[in-house]
Image (spheres, rainbow, N blue to C red):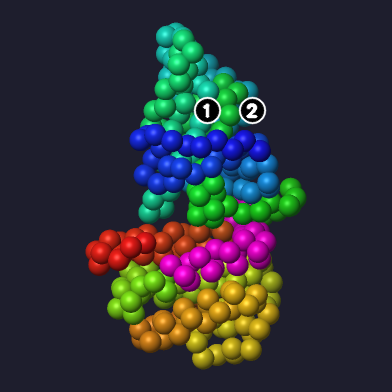
Amino acid sequence: MVEDQLEGARAGPEFRESIMREISRVEVRPEKSPQDHGRVLLLDKDGRCLTIIIGKAEEHAIHRAVTGERPPRPLTHELFLSALESFGISVKEARVTGLQEGTFFGALVLERAGEEHVVDSRPSDAVALAMMTGARVTVAEEVMRRGGAQYVRSEADLEKIWEGFVVAGPEQFDQDLVELCERLLELSDAALAKVVEKVGATAVGTALAAMSETVEEKPGWKEKVVALTPTIKPEARQNLPEDVAQALDSLLAKLERAGIRIDADSLPRRLSAERVIEARKAIRAAFGQVTKQSGTGC
């Protein structure tokens, strides 16, 4: 696995020293995406799959590059690439470098006369140009970890992601759950109440429910959600790893002290990947806003 150190002022808003992971597979399926936006799936060599919401134009540009389709007249990405080539500039790498309040940031590595130049870019544009030229695509490790990357063990898992299901293994959810709990436990009761006020207790419950087990469409998932409330069926938490159970219990006790109760009946009956990822992003974004306002370190 390629492990480069991302450096420099143009690395994006976060993770400037993060290890970069090489992407071995890029997928877009315009027919599977909504009318108002597209999706690109980036899979690394460890089987992790990162989903990024992109524009429809960028989705189609990546699709043309993957399928080898050539438009009758140059479209935006084809025109830009032609302009680069006319000046002797080649595309070396597309990087997904940062994640801030739900927005992904990227960079494009260009080469001219043996000198490399790094320019800011939306990840979708950078990936499109990389796919058109055969350049490599890399993602910062912290982006993979915090951006909701899921473990894909088979083509069936990949199909589930395209259908909107969560397929990540429980170990990854456990890791994310402990990290999220620890970050929220750093807040005062009042600050935690502000976080929940911003995103809603339902979003908190959705994220915790998803990160406490592998979530698929199966009858027992709602009982697990109920177990996340402070007072109902605490015995259901006995199957969680000890560190996860402790972190969860501590957070739930803190929520209770802050006067916050997660109502399991108000949670969605089907946890899709996008719903879970959006809930987690919303919590982390609210966490950042509250700590910034209060002067508490993140």
Instruction: Bin the neighbour count of mark 1 within 10 Å (Cα to Cα): few under 14, some 14-19, many 20 and up.
Output: many
- Count of residue discs: 2
Residue 295 at what x, y percent from top left? 25, 64
**Which of 33 and 50 lies nearest the eye of the viewer?**
50
Q: Quadrant of residue 107?
A: top left
Q: Is residue 36 above or below residue 60?
A: below
Q: Which residue is mark 1?
A: 93
Residue at disc 1, secondary structure: strand
- Residue 279 visible in the picture: yes
Discs 2/1, front:
1
Q: Is residue 78 magenta?
A: no
- Residue 30 visible in the picture: no
Q: Which residue is mark 2?
A: 67
Residue 111 at what x, y percent from top left? 47, 17
Q: Is residue 297 above or below residue 35?
A: below
**Which of 69 and 111 lies nearest the eye of the viewer?**
111
Q: Earlier in the sequence, mark 2 or mark 1?
A: 2
Kind of residue sitting beneath label 2: Thr
Residue 149 at what x, y percent from top left? 58, 52
Q: Is residue 9 above or below residue 260?
A: above
Report the magenta stretch's main SS. Answer: helix
Q: Residue at left 48%, top 71%?
A: 181
Please give left or right for residue 233 compared with residue 35 in the image.
right
Please give left or right for residue 135 compared with residue 100 in the image.
right
Q: Quadrant of residue 194?
A: bottom left
Image: magenta residue range: 161-183
Kind of residue sitting beneath label 1: Glu
- Quadrant (top left/top right/bottom left/bottom right) for the N terminus: top right
Q: Is residue 71 above or below residue 20?
A: above
Give the CA separation, mark 2 to mark 1. Answer: 20 Å
